[in-house]
Image (spheres, grey):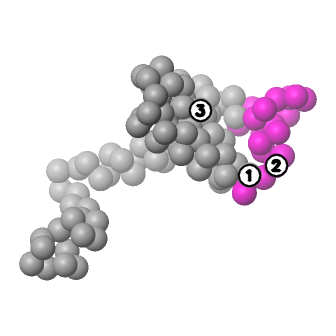
Amino acid sequence: MVEMLAQLEKIVHSRQQQPKPGSYTNQLLEAGLTRIAQKVGEEGVEVVVAALAQDEDALLGEMADWLYHATVLLAMRGISWEQVEGILRARHRPDAPTTPPLPGTGDPENPGS
């Protein structure tokens, strides 16, 4: 998985440096950050729909679409998957602070928890 994301990231960076006419990636990059963020959101909704109402192949396809669009978004912002991985690793260190629970999921005696 990591290798595929790295390869996809290289392709997106290549399109940033050397645009390829007709490339969907270049169309997204030219459309700008707002459009790319919209696509990430749209694909996220499609992931949810596939998870709840479609088969495994549909879900896998939608997840792949979401990862692609997320890769383009990160590249547009100058962020790498390696940086995201670093955040995940830091969160899972044995000495990492625990994440506070979401509102409404904590102690019923202490609603703010």
Viewer-closest of 10 and 98: 98
Q: Quadrant of the C terminus?
A: bottom left
Q: Position of residue 52 (x, y in %)?
A: 41, 37
Q: Quadrant of residue 56?
A: top left
Q: Residue at x 78, y 52 (%)?
A: 32
Q: CA distance from mark 1 to mark 3?
A: 15 Å
Counting the numbered discs, the total is 3
Three-letter code for the amino acid on which mark 3 is drawn: Asp
Which residue bears the numbered disc 2? 31
Viewer-closest of 103 and 52: 52
Q: Position of residue 29 (x, y in %)?
A: 78, 44
Q: Quadrant of the N terminus?
A: top left
Residue 70 appears in the figure: no
Left or right of 39? Residue 112 is left
**Secondary-structure class at tag 3:** helix
Placement of 91 over or under 67, stated as above or below = below
Q: Residue at x 63, y 40 (%)?
A: 69
Q: Residues within 10 Å of mark 2 (few under 14, many from 20)?
A: few
Left or right of 5? Residue 75 is right
Which residue bears the numbered disc 3? 65
Q: Quadrant of residue 55?
A: top left
**Secondary-structure class at tag 1:** helix
Tell me which segment is drawn in magenta.
13-34
Q: CA distance from mark 1 to mark 2?
A: 6 Å
Three-letter code for the amino acid on which mark 1 is drawn: Arg
Q: Residue at x 55, y 39 (%)?
A: 46
Which residue bears the numbered disc 1? 35
